[in-house]
Amino acid sequence: MNRDFIGWIEKAKKDLESARNSLKSNDFDWATFQLQQSIEKALKAVLIKKEGVLAKNHDLVYLGNRLGLPKNYLDYCKKISPFYTINRYPDIPEINLTNKDVEKYLYWAKEILEWCEKKI
């Protein structure tokens, strides 16, 4: 059995913790990128466990649909997925985020990560 999923879920946890630290230093852009990465890695961990292969895709909704992620979590993914590109490319318009926004996204990411941990 392919046990790579363990490394992916551990990286997901570290990314979530890094996102919390970035929020503490008011680096909202970096925090949202890190929490997006946390969710992506957690979803990929479950896919590796389930299918034995790595999904080479960054779209959280796509990954979540492949796993049967609950609708409320898919809704969270829809809002968070764009942070992958928004924070990496300077030609994409930024979103004005507040501390409260990022705290909410971190809470959502934590919920999805916990869902993923239960699946592996």
Image (cartoon, helix red, strand yellow):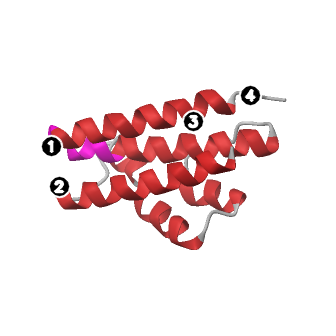
Instruction: Return the disc, 1 or 3, that comes first in the chain's sequence.
Output: 3
- Identify the residue at image location x=49%, y=69%: 75
Q: Can residue 57 be seen in this view?
A: no
Above or below, 114 against 22 in this view is: below
The kind of residue tagged 3 is: Ile
Gap in angstroms between the C-alphas marked 4 and 2: 37 Å
Q: Earlier in the sequence, mark 3 or mark 4?
A: 4
Q: Earlier in the sequence, mark 2 or mark 1?
A: 1
SS of the residue under disc 4: loop
Q: Position of residue 56 (x, y in %)?
A: 65, 40
| Mark 3 neighbour class, 10 Å CA radius: few under 14, some 14 to 19, many 20 or more | many
Disc 4 crowd, CA 10 A, few/some/many (<14, 14-19, 20+): few
Inspect the image, locate mark 1, and give the three-letter code of the amino acid beneath it.
Asn
Residue 20 seen: yes
Residue highlighted by disc 1: 26
- Residue linked to disc 3: 9
The disc at residue 99 is 2
Which residue is label 4 attached to?
3
| Neighbours of disc 2 within 10 Å: few (<14), some (14-19), many (20+) | few
Q: What element carries label 2?
A: helix
Element at label 1: loop
Cα distance between the residues tagged 2 and 1: 7 Å
Task: Estimate the spatial distance between the alpha carbons at disc 1 and disc 4, rounded to whole Å.
Answer: 36 Å
Rendering quarter of residue 53: top right
* Residue at figure coordinates x 46%, y 41% from the top left: 37
Q: Give the range drawn in magenta.
A: 25-32
- Do the CB atoms of the residues marked 1 and 4 lie less than 8 Å apart? no
Q: How far apart are marks 2 and 3 (CA)?
A: 26 Å
Give the quadrant of the N terminus.
top right
Mark 4: amino acid:
Arg
Residue type, label 2: Asn
